[in-house]
Image (cartoon, rainbow, N blue to C red):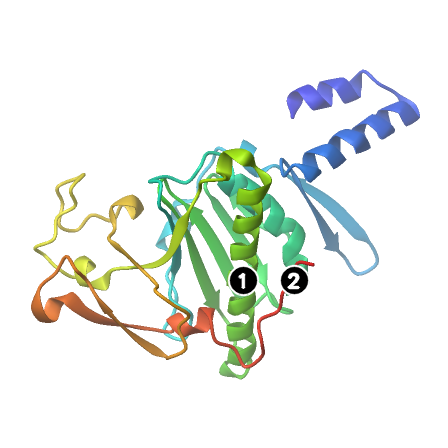
Amino acid sequence: MQLINKVFEDLHGSGKEALQRSVLDMMEKYGFLAKFHHHHSNSTEIKYFFPAQLRVSHPELWKLTPQESDPCSLIFNFCNGFVPHGLFPQLVSHLITLFPKLECTKHPKLYCNGAHFLLGKKSQFDLVLLCSKHCIKLVFKGYDTDSEQVAGNSLAVQVRTLIEQELERLCKQWHWLGNVHYDVCISCSACESSSATQCKRHKSASCLDQDCMHLLPISSVVNEPVTLFTCPEQVGEHSRFTLTNLHKWYSSSTSEVTVLE
């Protein structure tokens, strides 16, 4: 970005404006920056974001957990063992451009390997994306009354659908992502609550490293409020656990909306 600014400083007048517009359009086209239209009462402000250039993290984002009424955390676990370099910033850039369709009126807060979006007409829903070495985690959290719970459920479905569409599109767009595959997973509560399970990397029974958590894939679309899971790493009663509100990522009172033409 500093090099681009230096080029712009050496130009003047209409030539500078034309070059600046061309460079920004090209960078937006290939996902290196995202343009967000921030609407004020009487005007519209354009903000540019460069997710790949961020170096400061936000530890508090990793501590965010859903409430009982919220969808559980959803995890995209990449089967090759790591999130491909550059995929997360590309995904965030695309979402910044597309999320205004989901009533995102305030500009996002971006960090290294993290993004925080405010969704809904009153910005009553938080969506946090977190990227570790092996997976991308989604946390969806609401802060309004129960009267808008149905709207929140529908919004969560649209968010998941949009993110899956964008991941698929990116894997098709860039040849170096052609062999990328991922599973949609949840974290294994059986292993988290077991004192006998040790992290193989840190040799700890209570390891909180996101990349060390045992994940279980979701086999199909979930429609029931309570879902039963079985952990193959545990034995007996400890191997079974239930998870609530996974269905809120999938079921909705309205049909799923395809936001991409």
Task: Between residue 174 and residue 52, name the one nearer to us.
Answer: 174
Residue for point 52% across, 77% down = 252
Q: Is residue 106 visible?
A: no
Q: Quadrant of the C terminus?
A: bottom right
Callout 1 touching callout 2 (CB < 8 Å): yes
- Distance, label 1 to label 2, CA atoms, is 9 Å
Residue 94 is left or right of residue 164, and the answer is: right
Q: Quadrant of residue 211?
A: top left
Specify few, some or many for label 1: CA neighbours under 10 Å numbering under 14, 14-19, or 20 or more: some
The label shown at residue 258 is none
The local secondary structure at tag 2 comes to loop
Q: Residue furthest right?
A: 14
Picture coordinates of residue 156, whole percent (x, y): 51, 67
Task: Between residue 144 and residue 170, name the one nearer to us.
Answer: 170
Residue at image mark 2:
259
Residue for point 43% across, 48% down = 130
Q: Is residue 82 visible?
A: yes
Residue for point 42% across, 47% down = 181
Picture coordinates of residue 89, whole percent (x, y): 53, 40
The local secondary structure at tag 1 comes to helix
Above or below residue 133? Residue 17 is above
Picture coordinates of residue 213, whole percent (x, y): 25, 51
Residue at image mark 1:
161
Q: Quadrant of residue 42?
A: bottom right
Amino acid at dot 1 = Thr
Residue for point 63% across, 57% down = 99
Picture coordinates of residue 215, whole percent (x, y): 28, 55
Tag 2 or tag 1, which sits nearer the N-term?
1
Amino acid at dot 2 = Val
Residue 135 is left or right of residue 93, and the answer is: left
